[in-house]
Image (cartoon, helix red, strand yellow):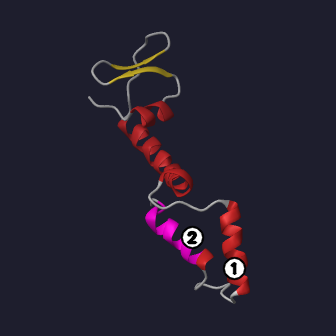
């Protein structure tokens, strides 16, 4: 069996050992019987958090620093583009499209 280690750990915080070829055990060596539905729910929760991290750190397109974003807003105000045509909106839209929110 190949476990989703991260999701198993979230679903079973008391899991001390997760080994694909052996099983899942607590700190005392007692085997934990895995409920696939709980692990699937945990995976969904983890995926919902991951898109937020990808938008800031690890995605193909990430948010600029706060300073960069403030500069975009300032430039958009000066150029009269404080609407959907401004650079701030375009930047944020590109990040959200590259790292979509999961369903």
Q: Nearer the viewer, residue 68 or 101?
A: 68
Q: Is residue 68 magenta?
A: no
* Start-end of magenta stretch: 89-101
* Residue with the mark numbered 1: 75
Find the distance from the CA under tag 2 to the CA under tag 1: 15 Å
Mark 1 secondary-structure assignment: helix
The image position of residue 54, as x and y in percent, is 50, 53
Q: Give the numbered dot on residue 103.
A: none
The image position of residue 51, as x and y in percent, is 50, 55
Q: Residues within 10 Å of mark 2 (few under 14, many from 20)?
A: some
Which mark is first along the chain, 1 or 2?
A: 1
Instruction: Give the position of the N terminus as an image quadrant.
Output: top left
Q: Residues within 10 Å of mark 1 (few under 14, many from 20)?
A: some
Picture layout, residue 90 above or below residue 19: below
Q: Position of 68 compared to 9: left or right?
A: right
Residue for point 70% across, 63% down: 67
* Residue with the mark numbered 2: 92
Q: Position of 86 compared to 14: left or right?
A: right
Residue for point 51% across, 66% down: 95
Q: Nearer the viewer, residue 26 or 72?
A: 72
Furthest toward the bottom, the residue is 80
Residue for point 30% across, 25% down: 20
């Amino acid at each position: 069996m190949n476990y989703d280690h991260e999701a198993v750990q979230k679903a079973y915080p008391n899991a001390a050992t997760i080994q694909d070829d052996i099983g899942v055990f607590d700190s005392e060596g007692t085997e934990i019987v895995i409920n696939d539905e709980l692990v699937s729910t945990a995976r969904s929760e983890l995926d919902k958090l991951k898109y937020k991290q990808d938008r800031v750190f690890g995605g193909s397109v990430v948010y600029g620093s706060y300073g960069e974003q403030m500069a975009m807003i300032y430039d958009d105000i000066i150029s009269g583009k404080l609407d959907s045509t401004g650079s701030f909106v375009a930047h944020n839209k590109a990040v959200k499209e590259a790292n979509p929110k999961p369903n």
